[in-house]
């Protein structure tokens, strides 16, 4: 018994010693990381050939769409890195606090996200780049032009949000009378509420102006011009030990290249319409769906698809217009992204050729379909493939992982994976550890699958009537 006690004591001592050594190593590593971070200014970054930017996933800052990185902040930091001859590495934090923490410990060289300017933070970081002025705005379909007109109005917000807090303060400032309604659902987002305003389900909500402006490009019937809060200045930040980098960002933001990049990003995300081309069931004249039916019939069998399904996808992408270009850059009859075309050895200029576009689209669909070979139902395979064509296969795999984690069937689309495609616009889900591709405006992908298959059914019914 004494021997056993001694043995246990020795084991405990060894464990404690290992823990102590590990703790010392970790502390030393953390100190070294901080020390290395402190010496990383622009000169060192150029020697390394890479700059790491940290940002947040969101519809305005950074997201992946059709397998290509996008976002207002992403476009700006990517162009800055290019101007300095640096490769850009993007890392993502869960919230604003972690953005600053990751910068300070050396996990990033710049925060490419608008950080509110405050005297406290000025002592900790260097603010740099384009200074933005933002505020909260009223999202409405009417034309209220003064906050005093909000008395007696019903405004819907999420409980505990900064928008709820601002409305409470505004109500006090006005002497009361604003009817503030909390939306009880935990998973509803500001963008969901904006969509509800557009559809007339609720009359008003509050949003940050940048989110509101972006969503106005989807919903042309909303007004987002009335400010309901004080204006807040914000900009990117770097460590105080990186004055060269801060100066370079400031110089770039104010020169012609930076100004041109900024104007292009503003136009792309906050001005260009992102409304889906009018969804309709076009007439089938003389048995023809489109001028390209022969090409659809020629190439669809190589995918094992009915040619009318391929035609429905093409109509969704372009309305059969060869020169159409989406806000994201998708081009031609089949809506091919330039990066995708390049990866397949297809020149962007050739995407206006209908046969080239269809061949390229078929190859993209074939590659996506390979990712769903384990799905037993053939119709589900089509749904997963269509979703991947719209959003990118990474987002669909994310939704499958979420479905599995939350007890749904990862091999079934309807009411299972489709549910989590919709949830990928919610921070709780796109920041989940199983998710690798972040934010997605999932309603677009969900509707994309439904509308293509609905039009395919229509085409099939109409063609059957014609041939009878």
Image (tube, grey):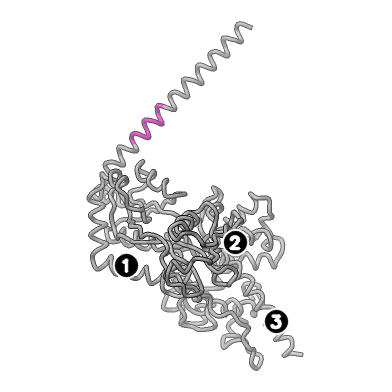
Q: Residue furthest bottom?
A: 286
Q: Which residue is mark 1?
A: 261
Between 164 and 151, the residue placed more toward the observer is 151
Q: Is residue 165 visible?
A: yes
Disc on the earlier residue, 2 or 1: 1
Disc on the earlier residue, 3 or 1: 1
Q: Which residues are magenta?
A: 24-32
Whether residue 62 sits left or right of residue 248 in the image: it is right
* Mark pair 3, 1: CA separation: 46 Å
Whether residue 177 sits left or right of residue 228 in the image: it is right
Task: Please give the count of numbered marks on the rendered protein.
Answer: 3
Between 372 and 106, the residue placed more toward the observer is 106
Q: Residue at x 58, y 14 (%)?
A: 8
User: Quadrant of the image for the C terminus?
Assistant: bottom right
Q: Are marks 2 and 1 in contact (CB under 8 Å)?
A: no
The residue carrying pointer 1 sits among few (fewer than 14), some (14 to 19) or many (20 or more) residues within 10 Å by Cα, namely: some
Q: Position of residue 53 (x, y in %)?
A: 36, 52
Between 269 and 330, the residue placed more toward the observer is 269
Disc on the earlier residue, 2 or 3: 2
The residue carrying pointer 2 sits among few (fewer than 14), some (14 to 19) or many (20 or more) residues within 10 Å by Cα, namely: some
Q: Residue at x 64, y 62 (%)?
A: 418
Q: Position of residue 135 (x, y in %)?
A: 39, 61
Between 318 and 428, the residue placed more toward the observer is 428
Closer to the eye: label 3 or 1: 1
* Mark pair 2, 3: CA separation: 28 Å
* Mark pair 2, 1: CA separation: 32 Å
Q: Which residue is mark 3?
A: 460
Does residue 176 lie above or below 11 as drawn? below
Q: What secondary structure predominates along the stretch shown in magenta?
A: helix
Q: Residue at x 49, y 64 (%)?
A: 65
Q: Which residue is mark 2?
A: 422
Residue 31 inside the magenta-drawn segment: yes
């Amino acid at each position: 018994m004494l021997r056993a006690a001694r043995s246990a004591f020795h084991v405990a001592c060894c464990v404690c010693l290992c823990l102590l050594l590990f703790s010392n190593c970790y502390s030393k590593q953390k100190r070294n990381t901080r020390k290395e971070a402190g010496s990383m200014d622009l000169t060192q970054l150029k020697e390394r050939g890479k700059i790491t930017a940290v940002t947040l996933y969101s519809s305005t800052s950074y997201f992946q769409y059709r397998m290509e990185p996008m976002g207002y902040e992403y476009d700006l930091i990517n162009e800055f890195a290019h101007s300095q001859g640096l490769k850009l590495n993007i890392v993502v934090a869960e919230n604003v606090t972690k953005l600053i923490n990751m910068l300070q410990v050396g996990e990033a060289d710049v925060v490419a996200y608008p950080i509110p300017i405050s005297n406290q933070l000025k002592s900790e970081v260097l603010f740099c780049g384009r200074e933005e002025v933002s505020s909260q705005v009223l999202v409405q379909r009417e034309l209220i032009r003064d906050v005093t007109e909000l008395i007696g109005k019903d405004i819907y917000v999420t409980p505990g949000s900064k928008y709820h807090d601002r409305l409470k303060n505004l109500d006090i400032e006005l002497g009361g009378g604003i009817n503030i309604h909390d939306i009880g659902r935990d998973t509803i987002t500001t963008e969901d509420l904006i969509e509800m305003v557009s559809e007339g389900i609720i009359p008003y909500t509050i949003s940050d102006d940048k989110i509101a402006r972006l969503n106005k490009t989807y919903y042309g019937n909303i007004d987002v011009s009335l400010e309901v809060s004080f204006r807040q200045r914000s900009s990117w930040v770097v460590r105080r030990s990186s004055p060269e980098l801060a100066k370079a960002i400031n110089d770039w933001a104010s020169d012609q290249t930076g100004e041109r990049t900024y104007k292009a990003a503003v136009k792309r995300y906050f001005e260009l319409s992102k409304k889906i081309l009018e969804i309709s069931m076009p007439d089938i004249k003389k048995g023809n769906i489109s001028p390209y039916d022969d090409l659809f019939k020629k190439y669809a069998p190589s995918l094992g698809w009915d040619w009318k399904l391929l035609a429905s996808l093409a109509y969704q992408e372009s309305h059969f217009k060869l020169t159409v270009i989406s806000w994201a850059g998708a081009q031609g009859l089949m809506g091919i992204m330039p990066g995708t075309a390049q990866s397949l050895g297809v020149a962007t200029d050739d995407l206006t050729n209908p046969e080239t576009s269809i061949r390229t689209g078929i190859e993209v669909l074939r590659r996506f379909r390979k990712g769903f070979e384990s799905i037993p139902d053939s119709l589900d395979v089509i749904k997963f493939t269509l979703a991947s064509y719209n959003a990118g296969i990474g987002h669909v795999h994310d939704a499958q992982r979420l479905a599995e984690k939350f007890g749904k069937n990862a091999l079934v689309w309807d009411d299972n994976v489709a549910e989590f495609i919709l949830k990928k616009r919610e921070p709780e889900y796109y920041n989940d550890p199983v998710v690798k591709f972040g934010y997605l405006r999932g309603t677009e992908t969900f509707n994309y699958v439904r509308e293509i298959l609905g039009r395919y059914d229509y085409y099939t019914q109409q063609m059957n009537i014609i041939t009878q």
